Amino acid sequence: MQFRFTFALIALLSGGMVFAEDLGTRTDVNGDDLARVRSVTALTTDFSKPENFETNPAGKGTTRFSVNQDSFSHFLDNLSFEQEEKFKLGNALFRKIWVSSPSSTQASDGLGPLFNARGCQSCHIKDGRGHPPFEGQAENVSMFLRLSVPPGENDPRPTVDGVRAGVVGDPVYGTQLQDFAVPGLPAEGRMVIDYVDLPVTLGDGNQVVLRSPTYSVADLAYGPLADDVMLSPRMANPMIGLGLVEEIPPEDILANADPDDADGDGISGRPNWTIAPETNTLALGRFGWKAGMATIRSQSAAAFAGDIGISTPLVDKPYGDCTDAQSDCLALPTGEQSRLGPTEAPSPVLDLVTFYAQTLGVPERRNVGDPRVLAGKAAFYQAGCASCHIPKFVTSRDAENPAHRFQLIWPYSDFLLHDMGEGLADHRPEGQADGFEWRTPPLWGIGLTEAVSGHTFFLHDGRARNLAEAILWHGGEAQAARDAFAGMNAQTRQDLIVFLESL
C-alpha cells in the first residue's frame, strides 16, 4: 500500500452521524520540504540493501549503547545539557515509590487508597513492556484489568463536538480492578486468567499451539460486579520514542485513515478522536492500546490517578479510582498538602514525569544489512504488514522541543484503529474504538524485549509467547497478512522474525 497523501477524510462517529472534514496537508513545511518528506517516507521497493538512515529509528535522538536491561532507559541523544538534567529529575520521579497517608515522607504521601502499583516504574519495568503473571507468581505486577459498563441512555461522559471519550466505569469498582490497597483497606479483588490450547497448522504442515485466555475476577471485596460489566486486560506498553510520536503531524496520521476502505485493500484504519483534558478540545488519540489518549501529559496524569491513586492538576482524583460506593476508601486521608501544592503530584512533578516520558530515546537498529534481515524485511512488506505498521514519519518542524523537530523516525505504526477480528476482540468499546479495534502498536525496539524485560510476551494481554504467535493471532483487517505469514515456508517465516528482532 502506498501512502495516501491526499486530503484526509476523517470519519467522526457520534450518535450515528458520520461527517467529513478536509484538514488539508502539513503547514509546518514549505512545498519543497513537503516533497522531501513524501519522498523519504514512501515505502521502499528495494530490499537488496538497507535504506538511508535505517539504523537511526529516532533520527538524531537515536541512542547508541550496548544491548542490556537499560536499553530503553537512555535519553534522546540530541538533548541539551540542561534537558539532560531535567530528564534525570523526571527519571527519579518516575522511579519514585509512593506511600500511604499520613507519612513522615510527606512529599511521597497519597498512595491509593486502592491501587495497582506504587510507582510508574512498577509497571513500566526498565521503561519496557509489561507481562502477565509468570508461572508461580501470585501477584500481577505490570498488567491490570480494565472495567466498564455500556453507557446507556444517561451517558455521564461529557461531549466535545459530539464526541465522548473514555468509558463508563462499573458503579462499584470503577474503571480498573485495583488489586492492592493501603493498610486497613481490602483490595478490590484479583484477576484470574485461564488458558486453553489452540492448535494452528501452518501452510507447510508445521503446527503451532497458541494459548487462548479467558478472564474473570475472584475475591471481590465490595460486592458483585455489574451484570453487564466488560473486562479487558492491559499490559504496560514500552516507553521509548513517545515524544517523537507526539510530534507526528496529525495530517500525516490521518492521511492513512480509510474508514470505508475506499481503496479496496481490506485495510480501513480510522482515528480514535478523544478529548484533551488540557484544553477540553477534540484531539487525535495516539497513546494507549486503543489510542484513547492524545498527549503524554494526559496519559501520565491518567496513570497517576488510575494506577497509583495520585492526584495531579490534570486529573484531580486524590482517591484514585475509588467510587462513591466505596465509603471506607473515601474516608481515608489523602496526601494533598497545601504547602506542597494543591494536588498530591503538583505541576512540577507532572511536568518532570511528562518530560521524562517525552525524551526517552530509541536504540539504534542492529544488523540492518544482514541478508536474512533484508529477506525478512521483504517478506514483511510482501505479506502486507507495512500497510498498518507504516515504517516512517517525519516529525513536525514546529515541535516545541528542538530535539523532536523535523526528525525522520521509524516507529512501524500508523497509530490508527483497526478491527483485529474475533480472536483478539475484548468486546469493550473505549471512546470511538469498538470492541474489535486496537491501535497499531509501534514495533521499534521490539527485538530488545527479552533483553530489557526478561520475557517475550506480546499483544495487549501477553497471550503471545513469541513474535510468531503474535502474528498468528492477527485477524480481521490483518487476516490476509496473517495468512500470508502462515503460508510461508519455514525459512521465510524465520527470516521475517529475524527482521522484527532487528528493530
Image (spheres, rainbow, N blue to C red):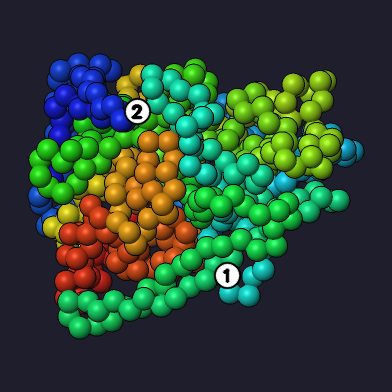
Res 97 quadrant in image: top right
Q: Name the spot of residue 436 as percent of width and height, x first.
A: 35, 50
The answer to which of 72 and 11 lies nearer the viewer is: 11
Q: What number is the disc on residue 14?
A: 2
At x 25%, y 47%, the residue is 388
At x 31%, y 35%, the residue is 271
Q: Name the spot of residue 131 as percent of width and height, x first.
A: 53, 61
Q: Of the residues under marks 1 and 2, which one precedes in the sequence? A: 2
Q: Name the spot of residue 490 as percent of width and height, x first.
A: 21, 77
371 to the left or right of 284: left
Q: Name the spot of residue 435 as percent of width and height, x first.
A: 38, 48
Secondary structure under badge 2?
A: strand
**Mark 1 vs mark 2, CA separation in Å:** 41 Å
Give the crowd class for mark 2: few <14, some 14-19, many >=20 residues within 10 Å: some
In which quadrant will I find the C terminus?
A: bottom left
Q: Is residue 167 visible?
A: yes
Amino acid under disc 1 = Phe
Secondary structure under badge 1?
A: loop
326 to the left or right of 370: right
- Is 241 located above or below residue 338 in the figure? below
- Is 124 located above or below residue 312 in the figure? below
Amino acid under disc 2 = Ser
Give the crowd class for mark 1: few <14, some 14-19, many >=20 residues within 10 Å: few
In which quadrant will I find the N terminus?
A: top left
Query: Which residue appears farthest toward the front when viewing the image?
Result: 153
Q: Are marks 1 and 2 in contact (CB under 8 Å)?
A: no
The answer to which of 188 and 383 lies nearer the viewer is: 188
Q: What number is the disc on residue 134?
A: 1
Q: How many marks are shown on the rendered structure?
A: 2
The answer to which of 144 and 243 lies nearer the viewer is: 144
- Is 245 located above or below residue 207 in the figure? above
Res 196 quadrant in image: bottom left
